[in-house]
Image (cartoon, rainbow, N blue to C red):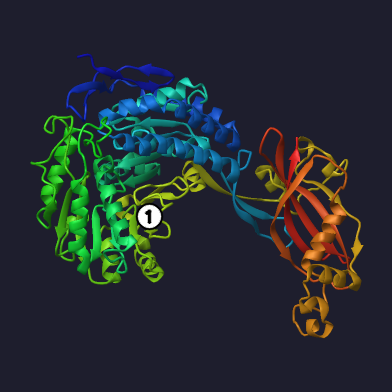
Amino acid sequence: MTLQQIESFAAGAWIAPGEGARLIRSAVTGAPMAEAGNDALDTQAMLAYARNVGGPALRAMTFHDRARMLKALAVHLGRHKQAMYEISFATGATQSDHLIDIDGGIGTMFVFASKGRRELPDGHVYLDGDVEHLSRNGTFLGQHICTPLQGVAIHINAFNFPVWGMLEKLAPTLLAGVPAIVKPATASCYVTEMCVRLMLDSGLLPEGALQLVSGGLGDMLDRLDCQDVVSFTGSAWTATKLRSAPHIIQNSIRFVAEQDSLNASILGPDAMPGTPEFDLFVKEVSREMITKAGQKCTAIRRIIAPDAQVSAVIEVLSARLAKTAIGDPALETTRMGALVSGSQKRDVLEKVSILATEAERVFGDPDNFEVHGADANAGAFLPPMLFHCAAPDTAQRVHDTEAFGPVSTIMGYRDVDHAVALANKGQGSLVASVITRDAAVARQVALGAGAFHGRLYFNNRDSMAESTGHGSPLPHMVHGGPGRAGGGEEMGGVRGVMHYMQRTAIQGSPDILTAIGEKWVPGAAEIPAPAHPFNRPYGSLQIGETIHTAPRQVSTTDIEHFAAFTGDTFYAHMDEEAAAANPFFPGRVAHGYLLLSFAAGLFVEPDPGPVLANTGLDNLRFMKPVSPGDSIKVRLTVKKKTGRTEEYGEVRWHVTLTNQNDDLVAEYDLLTMNAH
């Protein structure tokens, strides 16, 4: 049999397996199918290629450029996902599993592309938080900025999700402007290799932005420096070994870990048999046990139910698991495929024997189960196995030993505090789910278990039709957890991008901060507008471009007309005596929204022009009341520009209203869409 040669992509070239190559067997048949690895990879050349070629090319792009690149990559992968489906069956994954791994990975890229366009600037610097005033008169200010690290991100991924596991790290890394070297687990690296080839062949990535190690990393981690990041997914043992290496510690190299954990699902005390919540609980637990043959870092390992409901859960869950068709994952009738390898099967059986010292197996016999369309002994097949721990308070192994397969243990609790204590015995988990319709129970669990979990998933009859499931980390939300779960976070939208950027505090004058952040800071120089800015296209507007309007006096008649027209007859605008009794007002005052309307009348250019729409106001504040007889005038400044489409861009205007004494009356940001 000719073995498939799984190559690495290093320093711009594909490298075939060589000395030190590892044999890969089919999870379904156990037959040798491929080999991967080459101990002769030049790791220093790979790092240099990423740092000196890929990094500069990515950093030259704006966040929006990189977001558009991610979207294009996602579209390209979507056109070729069928090919990835076909080779993924050999990992033991079913078609339903492919949708989680391949479609889920592509979907994650789409989300980061969208968030990059909506939440990051069309520039090179991300502003983190508001300007800090460090001086009395505002001539010395502070601002936090984030800029891309000038190194490389090393992604070490687990075997269970060869596509999603790569793309959920790669998307925020590339969006940050940092090149990546991807090292998938060898057992399923042939799927990752196909995905990487598709991305590289697309021509959408800058040279040096992405490399692949199929096999071992060699001495690469020993060559990293303070600008590099290691992002790891896998076992706690491996993570500890890698992150505790002297070179990693001595150079303060960032290490982001997402580790396997003893995740729990709690059946709320209100979720009695016969309720939609009870049925939902059983469905969620069953799904988490059999999806990817239980090989998910978020899978439910501990089932926590009220003491009175344990027997009912065992009975109903066992009946549901008994209907699971195990077999060749390529068959449409198969509900659960094989584990990824024979060695993984052996590891699960070893862990099962440890769990059996504290819990009784109540469903599933690894020595007697049916497999459709494949040989149970030749392939890495196991049945779902359910254990019952009668003494969870004194047990240890059920709270610290994970069988990374279709295995879960049920235990009873006395009250909600006891359920929380059992969930927390995992000493840090990626996720815990709570199936309840009782908001008080949800709050009690959140306050008691939040510190031990990276995510809490609550579900009931009201949300279950649209919920995504206990075991589905979403790119919008953080994925990680404390303690045993690794103490790190992945994804989480822009939060995930920040892992690959450096937060720096900058201090200086308003002009300096404006130049660095490409966002006008009050107090910075104003650029006189050569013509009314509403008459000028998006591309010609400059940051800091400003107009000052003539004043307008506010009269009692104006206030009363506005009150009658809008129906806002609040006493502060209509009753002199009552208003004067209010410590905030000198007497009757103008409506705040009347002032905004007058302001618009002062600065708006009425003729048709590049301004297409007013899309909103941000950060509105009223600082000082305006009394009848006072005057207001407006300063309108181009604060920030953000490209949106080829036809138009968003302009953020800084608007201030001052009175006849130049006292600040109101301040806000105005958003408009302007044609190019």
Residue at 74%, 54% (x, y): give it.
Answer: 522
The x, y position of residue 116, in whole percent, is 56, 41
Can you identify the residue that label 1 sits on?
454
Q: Position of residue 429 (x, y in %)?
A: 31, 54
Could you say where residue 251 lies in the image, as x and y percent from the top left? 39, 41
- Across and down, in percent, residue 87 comes to 31, 25
Query: Residue extending furthest top?
Result: 2
Q: What element carries label 1?
A: loop
Where, by quadrant of the figure, is residue 405 drawn? top left
Q: In which quarter of the image is the N terminus?
A: top left
Of 401 and 281, nearer the camera is 281
Q: Where is the C terminus found, in terms of image quarters?
A: top right
Residue 212 seen in render = no
Q: Which quadrant of the view contains residue 395?
A: bottom left
Q: How crowded is mark 1: few (under 14 residues within 10 Å), some or many (20 or more)?
A: many
Work out whether residue 536 can be spotted: yes
Residue 341, placed above or below residue 622: above
Q: Nearer the viewer, residue 526 or 587?
A: 587
| Residue 53 vs residue 117, the one in the foreground | 117
- Circle count: 1
Amino acid identity at mark 1: Gly
| Residue 20 location, quadrant | top left
| Above or below, comparing residue 183 to residue 356 in the picture | above
Name above or below for residue 130 compared with residue 340: below
On the rendered structure, is 603 left or right of 650?
right
The one nearer the camera, 475 or 498, is: 475
Residue visible at 49% across and 22% down in the picture: 202
